[in-house]
Amino acid sequence: MGRGWGKKSLLFFSVLILCNLVVANFAYSQSWENVLDDALKGIKMRPEDLHFRTDYTDSDSFRLTIVDQLMEHPMESIDYSKLLAKKLLQTDNPLSTNLFNVAQEMDIKTSPPLMHLPGSPERIELQKILRTLKMAIGRSAGMVQESFRLIRSEEIQYLQETLPELMEEDLERADKNPYEKWIEGKEIEEKTERFLEIVQRFDRVKMVHAGILLLSVLDDFMDQLSKGKIIVEAERKRVKCPIAQGDVLYYERTNFGDVVVGGYGETVYKGEAALILDLGGDDRYENRAGGVLGPESPISIVIDLNGNDHYLYAGDYAQGGGGFGIGILIDLEGDDHYSARHYSQGSGILGIGLLVDRSGNDQYSGDTGTQGAGAFGIGLLQDLSGNDLYSSAFLSQGFGFTWGFGALIDGEGNDLYYAGGRYRDWLRYEDHFISLSQGFGYGIRPFASGGIGILTDGKGNDTYISDIFGQGSSYWYSLGTLVDFQGNDKYSSYQYAQGCGTHLTIGILLDLEGDDEYVAKGVSQGCGHDLSLGLLLDEKGNDNYSAYDLSQGAGNANGIGILIDGEGRDNYLVRDPKNTHGYGNFRREYGSIGLFLDLGGEDSYSGYGGNDGFWVRSRYGIGVDIDRSEDQDEK
Amino acid sequence: MKKSDIRLWTLDIGLWLIFGLGSTVYGQNFDLSPMDSLFIRASTGEIKYLQLNEPARDTLVQMGEKAVPYLIDQLDTKSARERHTLIAILKKMKEPAVEPLINYIQEDPDRGSSRLAAHILGKIGEEAGVAVPLLIGLIQHQNWRMRMSACEALGEVGDPRAVEPLMTALKDTVFLVRKGAVFGLGKMEDRRSISALIQALGDGSYAVRYPASEALETIGRPAVPPLIKALKENDSITRSLVCGVLGKIQDRRALKPLRRMLKDEDWGVKVAAKEALRSLKSKGRIIESPDSPLGQRLETE
C-alpha cells in the first residue's frame, strides 16, 4: 500500500455507493499497478483475482506455453508484449537471431546449425558467395523435406487442399442459406480433425533449423555487402536466361532450382527461382519473388539491392511467402510496390516466410494470410523505414493462427494499415466485414489453440483501420497484440477490437506515446469477453476515445476488460453508460471484471466517468480517475 | 382422440408443410432429415435468420419425447451455439428429457458432453429430482468441470440431500468447483451451510467469495450471529464482505458491531461498514445521494 493511499482511499470510498458517481479533488502518487490493486480492493477483489484457468476446455497439443502463462497471469501480457515488440524492432538484430527468438516463443527450443560465408579480411568475389549460398540452400532444402518425413505425400496434398477451407472465406458463403452452411460446417469439422491429426506430425524444429541456417548465411552476406566487401564489377556481362528478361548477368540451373543474378539495369522476372540476386534498377517481378509452395522445391530467396521495384503476382505464396517451405524476399532500397493474393508478403504456412524492406515508401496489397502471418509456421514482414501503405482483407498484418507466429514490424514513417472490406460478416452484420488482423491471434474453436499475432510500429503518425476483429485482439487460446511506440495515431474499428479478447484468450493494444484517437462501436477498447482479457493501455498523450457500448474497461461473460490511460488530457465518449467505463456483468453464477483507470490530466467524460473521482456502476466493475502529476508537483 | 394427440397431428402436418416443402424453401434440395432442418433453424446464429430460432425451438419443445432422441444425439456437438440451443430447448421440455439425460450421463460420465447433460438437468430444475443421486456421485468425478456442473445442477434442482455433499465440495482444489458448490448452497438456503459459507467469504477467488456473500444474504437473519463473529477475521476482504452481507440482511443486531468496524485499520473495511450502516439505516433503499445531509453525516460518523 502506497504512502498516503489509505487516507485518500478512505476519504473517497467512504462516499462510494453503488450507482453513484463520486467526484473529488485529490492526487495520487502510485504506479498504475498500485492504482489497479487499490481499485480492485474497492470492489473487494485482490490482484490474484485477475486470473484465468488454462483448462476451461480440454487442452490440445497446439497450445503455446506463453498463452497458458498469460492466461494464468493476464497482467503480464503488458510487459510481455512490450518486450516482444522491442525485440522485433531491433533493426541491428541479424535475421537469424530474430527467427531464433520467435521460435522460442513458439516452444521451439533449439540449437540450430549455422553456416557462414568464407571469412576474409579482403573483398570477396560474388561467385564465391553464390557458391556458399547455393550450398546453404541445398542443405536447407534437405532439412525442409525432412520436416515432412512423417507425412505421406498424399497427406501433404490433403493439407494443401484443406488449408484454404480452414483459412479462407468464400465470397459466395454469405449468400448461402443456413442449411448449406450447416452441411458445409459439418464437413469442415471432419476435415479439420483430419488436418490437425496430420499436421501434428510436421517437424517444426527441423523447419526452423532450415530457416536459421539459411538466414545465418544471408546475415553474413548482408553484413559483407554493407561493408563493401563484395566484388560485383566482374559480373557485368549479360547472359541469356529462360526465366528473366533484361539485365541478367548470371544464370544457372541447379538441383534445387534456378539461380539468377540481375544487373544494375531493369530486369523482368517471370519464372520461379531458388535464388535471385538483383544488383539494382527498377525491376519487375512477375513471379513468386521469394515465395514457394513446397515441399518439392522448398526454398526461394530474392535479394534486391536497389531500385523502385514492382512485385506483382496474382496468385498465392509469393513475396516472402513460405508455404511448406521457406520463402525470403529482401529489398534494401527504393519505393516498392508489392501485390499478391493469399499467404504472401511475410507469410509462413507450414513453413517460414520473410519479407524485409529496409527503406523507401512502400505499398503492400494482399488478401488473406498476408503481411506478417503465420499458420503452423512463422511469417514476418519487416519494413524498417518510409511512409508505407498496407492493405489486406483478412487474417493479416500480424496474424497468428494455430501453431503460428505472424508479425508485421514497421520501424519508422507515417503508415496506413487497412484490413477488411472484402468478406462480409454474415453472422453478425449485413454491412460489415471481418478483418481478424492488425495484431490478431486466432485458434480453431474448439479443436486447436491459436498462435501469436503482433503488429508493432516504432515511430510515426499512423492510421489503423479494421472492421470486425482487429487491432490487438484475439480469439481462442491465442495472443493478439498491437504495440505502437510513438506518434499521434488513429485507430478505427467496429467491433472486437482495440484490446479485446474473445473466448478464452488474450488481446492487448499498447500505445506508448502521442495524442491518439480511438473509435469503435463496441466490445472494444479494453473489453474481455468470455473468459478472456481485453486490455488497452495508452501511456502518454492527450487522447480521444469514442465507443458506443461494452467498451472502455468492460468485462463480459466472465472476461476481464481493462482500459488504462497514463498521462494527458483525455476525452472519453460513450453512448451507453450502463456497460462502459469500468463494467463487469454477471454470468455463469459469477462476475466479469471491468476496470477503468485514468492516471493523469484533466479529463472529459460523456458516460458515467468523471474527472478526479471513483465510481462503481456494477458489482464487478470500477472506474478511477486520478491525477498523479499533481501529486508529483506537490512533492 | 385426445387433445394431446390432436396437437401432435397438427405438429406433424406443420412439420411436413415446413420440411416436405422445406427442402425447397431456399430453392435447393438438401440431404437433411426434417429434424436436422428444424434444429438448424433453431440454432442458426446468422443475423439474417435469427427470427427462425424461436419458432423452431418452440416446435421442438412441443414435440417433447419425439424430439428427445435426436436432441440427445446432438449433445456432442462441437458448436457452442448448438449447445446453447440444446440447453434452451431441453430445459423447457423438462420431464421428457430427464430420463434420457440421466441415461446419457450413465453411459459414459467421462465424455465432455455428459457435462452438458448434467448442466441441462440443473436447468430443468425440480423436475429433475430423480437425477439427484447421480449428480451427488458426480461431485467426486475426476474432471473438475464435471464436478462444477454437478454442484451447480444440484443447486438448481434444490434437493436438500445435496447440502452435505455440496459443503464437502467447498473444499475442492479448483475454485470453479467451489464456486459451483457455493452457488448450489445459495439456492438451497439451508442453515446447515452458514458456517461453510462464511468460511467461503475468505476464499482465494472472488468467484467464490461473491456468491458466498449472496448465499448468506439469502439465508438472512439466522446467519447474523456467526457473521458478527466473522467481523474479527484476519482477512480484510472477508471483513468487508461480512459488512456488506450484514448491511443487506437488515438486522439491527448488526448495528453496533458495524459501527465498531468504522475504526478498522483497513480503509476497505471502513468503507464497507459505512455502506452497510447506510443500507441498514435506510432499510435497503438508497434514499439519499452521497452529498446529502445523511451522506455527510455518515462521512463524519
Image (cartoon, coloured by chain):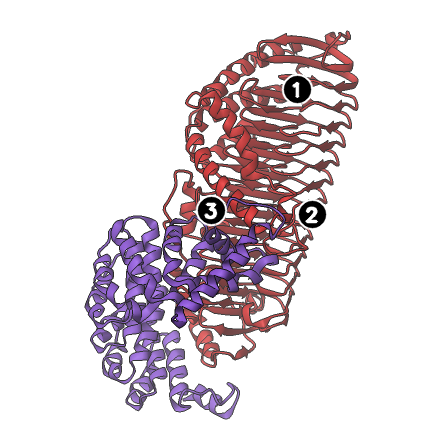
Chain colours: A red, B purple
Q: Residue at x 30, y 73 (%)?
A: B186
Q: Is residue A557 visible?
A: no
Q: Which residue is more in the foreground, A26 or A184? A: A184
Q: Which residue is more in the foreground, B167 or A358? A: B167
Residue A31, x across and y down, in percent: 49, 60
Q: Residue A313 lies in what quarter of the image?
A: top right
Q: Residue A327 lies in what quarter of the image?
A: top right
Q: Residue at x 38, y 88 (%)?
A: B280
Chain for numbered disc 1: A
Q: Which residue is mark 1?
A: A225
Q: Is residue B126 visible?
A: yes
Q: Earlier in the sequence, mark 3 or mark 2?
A: 2
Mark 1 to mark 2 CA distance (whole Å): 41 Å
Q: Which residue is more in the foreground, A338 or B297? A: A338
Q: From the viewer's perspective, is residue A294 above or below residue B199? A: above
Residue A249, x across and y down, in percent: 74, 10
Q: Residue at x 51, y 64 (%)?
A: B54
Mark 3 surroundings: few (<14), some (14-19) or many (≥20) residues within 10 A: some
Mark 3 to mark 1 CA distance (whole Å): 47 Å
The label shown at residue A421 is: 2
Which three-letter amino acid code belongs to the residue tagged 3? Arg
Q: Earlier in the sequence, mark 1 or mark 2?
A: 1
Mark 1 surroundings: few (<14), some (14-19) or many (≥20) residues within 10 A: some
Which three-letter amino acid code belongs to the residue tagged 2? Gly
Chain for numbered disc 2: A
Which three-letter amino acid code belongs to the residue tagged 1? Leu
Q: Earlier in the sequence, mark 3 or mark 1?
A: 1
Mark 3 to mark 2 CA distance (whole Å): 24 Å
Give the label, 3 or 1, closer to the camera.
Answer: 3
Position of A459 compared to A220: left or right? right
The label shown at residue A445 is: 3
